[in-house]
Image: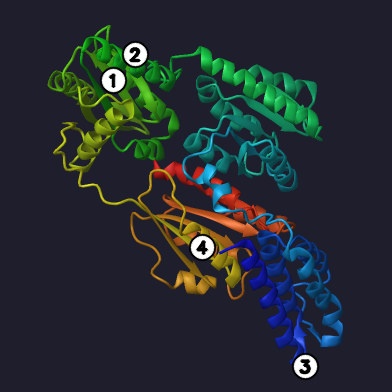
């Protein structure tokens, strides 16, 4: 469906609404408010910019909470001028909606963006900083409390952190003390932004290890230049480092170099090599049960066990998170299996202690070897990954050799996208675009929509183990978006359910409540669909891969 068609639908619906109202004796102020609120978001999304601006300014004269009825001679003065603007906007540039060709750079793979985590409860400042930073192509995560900030830090591993000193649940200094060790090891710069900027507090923050301390109010131009400078410096760090600071294993960059070198050597001399992928079993449960510091101890111990069990010519790398890779030159897959089995036995014999409890950790593995018919690195890693999946799927704490007859038994991965919005046109636009969305790592996408919170909550939308992205309008009749969000977080496990609130531009109160109640992100209406897809894929990356 073209953008012009969407514009025509908005105009048609607007005229039908006003015509229906003109036949009524009065119209409630609540209905007028909701009409203008929906029109503002929808018009801006499809590129009806003049209509959006007039709806936005007119909205100021009405309230959802005032119980008043308006006759046509009064509401008509505010609403009929909207009809005159459709002709002006109809042939304008397609605007925010975009086309599939414009989107393709974002939806067929993860966009390369530096991620910034802002931990600050000043929602107006946070919203302004997010908008300013995203104009510079950074991706921004928001936490309005220390608890939320720590959760995002440990689960998402941002590239840079902006931290306020004064937070509602605990001091920013206390947060800093909890994360500074890991941030240093992962080389994540921390910048304090705070209204508290006495010499003593700045000296103390610097002594703990922050990179910069910027006093509020911020000079946004200076601030953006500083952020770019720090990312440039971080890039230089990363390019000069080949060892993962936390575990002592080589990093992903060195993994790529080693793969390229071994593959080149095989093509030139025919010397074989094997590669094993090893993934710690139930590692997220370790973090959730005993804390991320104990999780780091487990990673370090595992790395120590492996590095003391391999030859000098072998290369051990941290592939990502709790997944590692081991290159074994001049070694066939059967011989490599003996090495990995020995490592499994040694790790399983280790005992960890936390919260006055003892526990053991195991890992699953998958092995393949290079062959004449297979000389592409991506295919080689794909084979090892398939074998690893079989190990995970057949009981864990075991290692599987790849063969072309290997039955992974892997079910098709399905991502459920659910739109909950009382605006029928918004539902139609969004579901239309998501129906043809093709995110990396997902076999299929199922899109559904609901016109109200009760219809959604009373449906059988949830299935155990499913993966869900819920786009939830903030203002709806019967149950508003915040009430629906509260029921989602109260009645369903948070894992594998991402909630993105769709909100009005000036509705800062709802933004605060939504983030505090567990929303993963918010998108301001009118929204840019390619940007929305990018944000969703970035968030979904946490549980899709």
Specify the farthest residue to the top: 312
Residue 456 vs residue 95, the one in the foreground: 95
Residue 447 vs residue 315, the one in the foreground: 447
Residue 532 vs residue 290, the one in the foreground: 532
Q: Is residue 209 visible?
A: no
Circle 1 crowding by C-alpha within 10 Å: few under 14, some 14–19, many from 20:
many
Task: State the CA–CA distance, disc 2 to disc 4.
Answer: 46 Å
Number of numbered discs: 4
For the point 56% across and 43% down, the residue is 148
For the point 24% across and 15% down, the residue is 328
For the point 72% across and 18% down, the residue is 203
Task: State the CA–CA distance, disc 3 to disc 2.
Answer: 80 Å
Q: Which residue is mark 2?
A: 261
Q: Which residue is mark 4?
A: 432
Q: Which residue is mark 3?
A: 25
Task: State the CA–CA distance, disc 3 to disc 1.
Answer: 77 Å
């Amino acid at each position: 469906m073209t953008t012009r068609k969407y514009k025509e639908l908005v105009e048609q619906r607007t005229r039908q609404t006003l015509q229906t109202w003109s036949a009524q004796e009065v119209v409630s102020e609540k209905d007028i408010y909701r009409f203008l609120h929906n029109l503002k978001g929808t018009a801006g999304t499809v590129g009806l910019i003049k209509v959006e601006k007039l709806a936005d300014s007119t909205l100021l004269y009405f309230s959802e909470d005032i119980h008043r009825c308006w006759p046509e001679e009064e509401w008509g003065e505010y609403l009929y001028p909207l009809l005159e603007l459709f002709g002006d906007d109809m042939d304008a540039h397609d605007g925010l909606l975009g086309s599939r060709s414009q989107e393709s750079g974002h939806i067929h793979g993860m966009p390369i963006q530096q991620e910034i985590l802002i931990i600050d409860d000043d929602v107006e400042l946070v919203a302004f900083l997010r908008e300013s930073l995203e104009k510079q192509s950074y991706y921004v995560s928001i936490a309005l409390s220390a608890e939320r900030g720590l959760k995002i830090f440990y689960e998402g591993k941002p590239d840079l952190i902006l931290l306020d000193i004064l937070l509602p649940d605990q001091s920013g200094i206390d947060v800093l003390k909890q994360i500074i060790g890991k941030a240093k090891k992962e080389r994540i710069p921390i910048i304090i932004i705070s209204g508290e900027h006495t010499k003593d507090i700045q000296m103390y923050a610097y002594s703990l290890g922050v990179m910069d301390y910027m006093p509020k109010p911020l000079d946004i131009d200076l601030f953006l230049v500083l952020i770019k400078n720090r990312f440039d410096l971080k890039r230089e760090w990363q390019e000069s480092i080949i060892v993962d600071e936390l575990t002592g294993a080589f990093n992903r960059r060195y993994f790529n170099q080693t793969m390229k070198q071994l593959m080149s050597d095989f093509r030139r001399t025919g010397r074989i090599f094997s590669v094993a992928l090893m993934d710690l079993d139930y590692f997220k449960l370790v973090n959730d049960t005993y804390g991320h510091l104990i999780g780091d101890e487990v990673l370090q111990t595992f790395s120590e066990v492996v590095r003391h069990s391999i030859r000098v010519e072998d290369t051990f790398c941290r592939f990502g998170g709790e997944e590692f890779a081991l290159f074994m030159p001049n070694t066939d897959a059967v011989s490599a299996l003996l090495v990995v089995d020995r490592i499994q036995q040694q790790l399983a014999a280790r005992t960890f202690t936390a919260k006055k409890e003892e526990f053991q950790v195991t890992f699953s593995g998958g092995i393949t070897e290079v062959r004449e018919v297979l000389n592409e690195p991506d295919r080689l890693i794909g084979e090892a990954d398939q074998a690893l999946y079989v190990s995970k799927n057949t009981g864990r704490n075991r290692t599987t050799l790849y063969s072309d007859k290997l039955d992974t038994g892997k079910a098709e991965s399905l991502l459920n996208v659910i739109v909950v919005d009382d605006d029928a046109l918004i539902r139609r636009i969004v579901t239309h675009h998501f129906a043809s969305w093709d995110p990396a790592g997902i076999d299929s996408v199922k899109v559904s929509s609901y016109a109200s919170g009760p219809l959604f909550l009373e449906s059988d939308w949830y299935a155990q183990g499913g993966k869900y992205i819920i786009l939830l309008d903030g203002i709806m009749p019967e149950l508003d978006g915040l009430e629906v969000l509260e029921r989602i977080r109260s009645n369903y496990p948070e894992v594998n359910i991402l909630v993105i609130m769709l909100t009005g531009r000036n509705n800062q109160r709802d933004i605060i409540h939504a983030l505090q109640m567990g929303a993963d992100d918010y998108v301001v209406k009118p929204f840019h669909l390619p940007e929305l897809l990018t944000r969703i894929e970035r968030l979904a990356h946490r549980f899709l891969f």
